Image: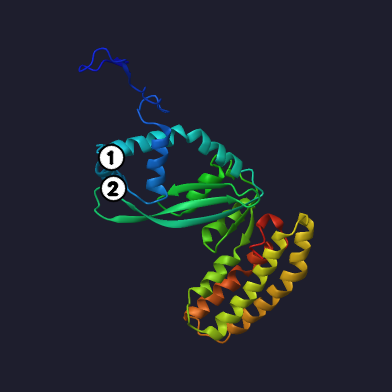
Amino acid sequence: MQKVCPQNPKSPPARQRARPPSFHPLHSFAPALAAQIICDKYQDHLPHYRQSQRFRRRHDIDIGRQTLNTWTHATARHLAPIVQAIREEILQADALQVDETPIDYLVPGHGTTREGRLWAYRDIAKGTCYFDWHAGRGADCLLDFLGYDQATNTIAYQGGIHTNGYNVYDSVAAKHGLRHAGCLAHTRRKFTDLGKASPEVTVPILLYIQRIYHIEKQTRQTAAPTACRELIRRARSLPIAGELHRVVVEERQRHLPGSDIAQALNYTLNQWHKIIIGSASESNGGDAL
């Protein structure tokens, strides 16, 4: 497209820069803008109405929140094949770390927020992650991701899971024969959440866990093959774990069942068999021990 300046007809024609191609045939916005909108919303927690205000304030551009919402959904649909490819790769993993993080979300018409769950799945060996949003945290959410087939009552995933003590993981793993390792980090959190309460109990327990983590850190920094790292865990970490278990059992007998420290000790004992499962397994990343 050419334009001639009306003040000087003899000047060379000005050329208007062509509009950058849109990555989506139905919407005229560039990939860079789509990336900015999505990162602002989901990584920097900037809702669409505030993004709209910022566009108007900084750039004198009027992009309504509904338009931003439409573009976000269009981008998600455009990226759906990549999302599916990541999911298929995750389902081939030998072991997955799984967690469901509470996230508040708005419910139109209710004037308040509700608590949903962002389910996170991580391939321990490769580090690949997949995030799956659900309004709840029931077994159906987990089974949906793992490829549950109602006709055969089976799931596509056949590896192991590494989780906290939520009972949904226990039931799904038991029903479908999955290896199930517990998470020492969640156990540790039960004691750190107590703060300064009962330091005579929490400090020795946390020191045992710290020693286990120190060994694991050293193990990961070596270039030793997998079998050697597993032998190191058996030789160095398991004896410390045995001492930790002894302390937890002894301390549990000294505290009333309803106390906070007793609940942390109970959680540790209830999860102990699953924590030990990962003690010699490289596939569990050494976090279960």
Residue located beneath label 1 in the image: 59
Can residue 244 be seen here? The reply is: yes
Crowd around label 1: few <14 · some 14–19 · many ≥20 (10 Å): few
Q: Secondary structure at mark 2?
A: helix
- From the top left corner, tell me how far across and down residue 271 is, in percent: 60, 68
- Using the rendered view, name the quadrant where residue 229 is placed: bottom right
144 or 133: nearer the viewer: 133
Q: Is residue 200 above or below residue 9?
A: below
State how far apart marks 1 and 2 are (Cα). Answer: 14 Å
- From the top left corner, tell me how far across and down residue 236 is, in percent: 75, 70
Going by the picture, which residue comes out furthest to the top?
A: 10
* Left-right relation of 126 to 130: right
Q: Which mark is residue 50?
A: 2
**Three-letter amino acid code at the position of disc 2:** Arg
Of the residues tagged 1 and 2, which is closer to the observer? Answer: 1
Residue at position x 60%, y 41% from top? 89
